[in-house]
């Protein structure tokens, strides 16, 4: 049995438990997770006795190659996806679960209008619940994505010069990710120098790096379907006392989180361990985002490590730990690593040096 069939079998049990006859999966990453299909614009119907993928003629050959065990319905020009669904849905299902968190209102309205005899029931997180625990193939893919990102960053750091711009370094990282056999970067790299580092998701501009004391670099690599995500601060010349102090607080906050991570620990407890270090140092209001998030098929996926979360860590989750301090007008420091949760602790998957003395580039 393929890993994709195992995932679909687990999903069938969740769907049955929810009281639905089937689930219509319309969110592209979830379709990929359940089938291995790398295309888009496709839906998947999963019921107790049938799995059917709906797509268009662009993907006929690709589906046959990537998903040879799946039955497919292919639409041609002039046929909509809702019309294609009409070949399989009527008369077969009374209640179909839909992905409420991702299906748009227009599609929901078309479905309910076209198939009035079917009750479409909202579901949230059925596939995402399965995706939180990574299997060995997923872990291997994430490790490769980490490796590619680290190699790419190493080259970009080695060629970095003060007259380079934020955008040039972002472009260099993208170039190197592809040279090291990555698909692309996980997201447009965040390269923010000096005061712009106070913007947690700053886009790379044509600002010169050497005009500032330091630059925050947040990047990752996609290897086929899976991603990595990490953040470091690089310094130009001598490290100032202020940068050293804030970097030390953020680093200690990250270590405090690492210390409590293990199977069964609350997501909020991990967030609290790191946040307390920053609060005790007097920077609590300057850490305005959650501590981390899951990674896998997407850069941001479940779980989320934040104060309002009630769930617990489970062995097999891969999460980021990324505390930060952001001071408008001065800049910001964030340190981010990818972490595998284990039964008795964690494994830090990323290995780029964190210590400031190892992050001086000029």
Image (tube, helix red, strand yellow):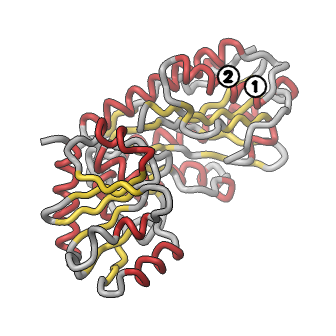
Say which residue appears at 87% left-offset and 27% top-offset: 211
Picture quarter with the C terminus: top right
Q: CA distance from mark 1 to mark 2?
A: 6 Å
User: Where is residue 77 drawn, in percent x and y?
Assistant: 49, 56
Residue 345 visible somewhere in the drawing: yes
Q: Is residue 13 above or below residue 361?
A: below
Residue 303 visible somewhere in the drawing: no
Q: Is residue 157 above or below residue 259?
A: above
Pointer 1 local density, CA inside 10 Å: few below 14, some 14–19, many at least 20: many
User: Where is residue 186 drawn, in percent x and y?
Assistant: 54, 37
User: Where is residue 174 drawn, in percent x and y?
Assistant: 62, 27
Q: Residue furthest bottom?
A: 117
Q: Which mark is residue 168?
A: 1
Q: Is residue 343 left or right of residue 209?
A: left
Say which residue appears at 70% left-offset and 13% top-offset: 159
Say which residue appears at 51% left-offset and 37% top-offset: 229
Q: Is residue 314 above or below residue 176?
A: below
Q: Which mark is residue 85?
A: none
Q: Quadrant of residue 126?
A: bottom left
Q: Which mark is residue 172?
A: 2
For the image shown, how many numbered marks are present on the structure?
Answer: 2
| Secondary structure of residue under mark 2 | helix
| Secondary structure of residue under mark 1 | helix
């Amino acid at each position: 049995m393929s890993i994709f069939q195992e995932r679909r079998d687990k999903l069938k049990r969740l769907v049955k438990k929810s009281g639905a006859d089937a689930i219509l999966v319309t969110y592209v990453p979830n379709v990929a997770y359940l089938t291995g299909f790398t295309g888009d614009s496709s839906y998947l119907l999963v019921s107790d006795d049938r799995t059917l993928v709906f797509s268009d003629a662009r993907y006929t050959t690709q589906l046959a190659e990537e998903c040879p065990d799946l039955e497919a319905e292919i639409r041609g020009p002039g046929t909509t996806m809702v019309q294609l669904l009409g070949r399989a849905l009527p008369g077969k299902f009374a209640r179909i679960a839909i992905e409420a968190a991702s299906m748009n209102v227009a599609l929901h309205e078309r479905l309910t209008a076209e198939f009035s005899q079917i009750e479409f029931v909202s579901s949230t997180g059925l596939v995402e619940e399965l995706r939180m625990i990574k299997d060995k193939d997923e872990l291997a893919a994430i490790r490769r994505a980490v490796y590619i990102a680290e190699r790419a960053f190493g080259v970009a750091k080695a060629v970095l010069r003060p007259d380079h711009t934020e955008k040039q370094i972002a472009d260099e990282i993208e170039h190197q990710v592809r040279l090291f056999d990555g698909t692309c970067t996980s997201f447009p790299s965040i390269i923010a120098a000096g005061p712009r580092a106070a913007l947690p998701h700053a886009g790379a501009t044509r600002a010169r790096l050497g005009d500032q004391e330091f630059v925050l670099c947040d990047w990752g690599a996609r290897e086929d379907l899976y991603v990595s995500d990490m953040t470091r601060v690089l310094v130009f010349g001598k490290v100032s006392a202020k940068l050293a102090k804030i970097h030390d607080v953020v680093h200690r906050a990250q270590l405090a989180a690492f210390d409590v991570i293990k199977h069964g620990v609350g997501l909020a407890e991990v967030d609290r361990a790191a946040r307390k270090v920053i609060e005790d140092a007097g920077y609590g209001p300057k850490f305005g985002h959650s501590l981390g998030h899951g990674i896998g098929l997407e850069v941001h996926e479940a779980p989320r490590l934040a104060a309002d979360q009630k769930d617990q860590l489970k062995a097999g989750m891969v999460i980021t730990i990324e505390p930060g301090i952001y001071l408008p007008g001065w800049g910001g420091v964030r340190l981010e690593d990818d972490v595998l949760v284990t039964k008795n602790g964690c494994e830090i998957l990323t290995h780029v040096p964190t210590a400031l003395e190892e992050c001086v580039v000029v």
